Amino acid sequence: MTPKRIEIVKDRLDFITLLSKSKEIFRGDNLLKRHKHTDTHSHPYGHFSALRYYLCLTCFDILGQTEEYTDFYSWLNSSSHSKEREVIFKKCENLDFQVYISSVYREYNAIYGVSNSFYRFIHQILSSENQKKLFDSVDIKKQTKVEPKQVEYEPTIKKKVDFMYLVRNSFTHKGKPISSIMGGFHFVGFNEDEPSSYDANGTAMWSHAQVYTEHRQDFVYVYSVIKWPSILIEIIEDTIKNAETEKILE
């Protein structure tokens, strides 16, 4: 976690704050669209919400990097990576051509792959306290498919982390926002940036925002997030603060 990467992330968090102040632009009961060809609906708030999630989750990539990111083509042609390439080429030289290519790419990804940086940030850089906050912010329910009925289910940490990576990738590669559009309607009264209520002790209670449904052969998994993106921002800021305080910058 270098000072340069920290500054990049701080700038991104500042942008998220400015973006959040523009929330009302994306709200309106009349902004709901129906798509005739797919018989689906969309609302710009879904993209607004997903963009904030995406910006936060890609901070995980940046802070989890062990090396300065280099795309595969640049890595193949860069003189500064020649020794690194030689080691990998040597390691894969006795393989069939097709296997050789995929193996070289796999070795490259082990060093520069975005997914590695993402998972490294969560599993190796976050404190145990921040890991708990992160994992608790994702709720997964399991239901039967034919006659919807909730069944007892304890989601694994891996399933929650894989879901976070899916949220990131779906917005990046498919243009599909994994988010809730409910905040876009004034009549609903849902605000993902504020607690929905407070208990008798004054503790803030946050609503669950259902954002994704995963269909399997016999079951359906329903994913909700709690306090997103606020909790993601809190975790990132606290991790940076800890790194700067303890001077554990790479």
Image (cartoon, rainbow, N blue to C red):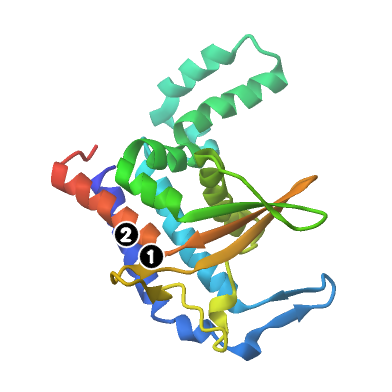
Q: Mark 1 points at which residue?
A: 230
Q: Is residue 181 left or right of residue 198?
A: right
Q: How crowded is mark 1: few (under 14 residues within 10 Å), some or many (20 or more)?
A: some
In the rendering, which numbered label is found on residue 234?
2
- Looking at the picture, how far across and down is residue 213, in whole percent? 67, 57
Residue 163, above or below 225: above
Q: Nearer the viewer, residue 124 or 200?
A: 200
Q: Kindly indicate whether the residue at mark 2 contacts the one at mark 1 (C-beta within 8 angstroms).
A: yes
Q: Which of 55 and 148 is in front in this view?
A: 148
Residue 174, above or below 49: above
Q: Distance between the residues labelled 1 and 2?
A: 6 Å
Residue 21 in view (yes/no): yes
Residue 17, above or below 109: below
Residue at 80 percent of width and 57 percent of height? 147
Q: Is residue 35 left or right of residue 81?
A: right
Residue at 65 percent of width and 62 percent of height? 176
